[in-house]
Image (cartoon, helix red, strand yellow):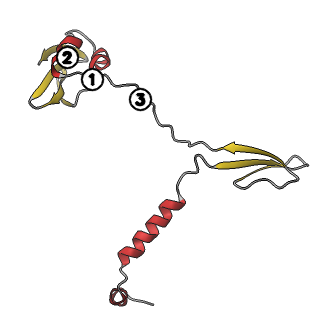
């Protein structure tokens, strides 16, 4: 058995073994999306699926594999500059209506008390910042 000390003398580190192993595992687990697959049906009706073309005595059908992970196609996110916030978000709007008008804020400060949930929505970054205050899901004030 080779010890770590002997490996260091040879210039081989345990880190390189681990890195190589991790890269090999990652490569082997890559999804097959976009690769060709084949549905093969024999004369007796048996169906098999394979990544290689079917034998000549089988009925062959090419299949395109699709990834089982859905990538959400996000609609264009509305965006508000500091001056737009007060124009697009109005006092009395619901939180959903405000999100639809200006998108989600860059930051939210939330306070829960016995009197309800109070939020400060922050649009923009210093020095161009607008604040929207929401209480129990309704816009109560705007500071821009």
Where is residue 72? Give x, y as percent: 45, 33
Q: What residue is at 23 percent from the left and 18 percent from the top?
A: 136
Q: Earlier in the sequence, mark 2 or mark 3?
A: 3
Q: Is residue 111 visible?
A: no
Q: Earlier in the sequence, mark 1 or mark 3?
A: 3
Q: What residue is at 11 percent from the left and 19 percent from the top?
A: 144
Name the residue carrying label 2. Answer: 84
Q: Is residue 54 visible?
A: yes
Question: How far is the residue under mark 2 from the one under mark 1?
Answer: 9 Å
* 91 lies left or right of 4: left
Q: Nearer the viewer, residue 33 or 89?
A: 33
Q: Are marks 1 and 3 in contact (CB under 8 Å)?
A: no
Per the rendering, the mark at residue 74 is: 3
Name the residue carrying label 1. Answer: 79
The quadrant in which residue 112 appears is top left
Question: How far is the residue under mark 2 from the one under mark 3?
Answer: 22 Å
Where is residue 129? Give x, y as percent: 13, 26
The quadrant in which residue 13 appears is bottom left
Name above or below for residue 3 compared with residue 102: below
């Amino acid at each position: 058995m080779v010890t770590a000390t002997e490996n260091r003398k040879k210039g081989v580190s345990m880190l390189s073994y681990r890195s190589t192993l991790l890269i090999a595992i990652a490569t082997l687990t890559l999804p097959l999306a976009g690769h060709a697959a084949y549905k093969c049906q024999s004369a007796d009706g048996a169906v098999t699926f394979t990544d290689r073309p079917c034998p000549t005595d089988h009925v062959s059908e090419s299949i395109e594999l699709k990834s089982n992970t859905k990538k959400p196609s996000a609609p264009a996110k509305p965006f508000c500059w500091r001056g737009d916030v007060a124009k697009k978000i109005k006092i009395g709007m619901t939180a959903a209506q405000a999100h639809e008008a200006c998108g989600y804020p860059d930051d939210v400060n939330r306070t829960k008390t016995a009197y309800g949930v109070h939020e400060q929505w922050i649009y923009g970054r210093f020095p161009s910042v607008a604040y929207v205050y929401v209480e129990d899901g309704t816009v109560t004030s705007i500071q821009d």
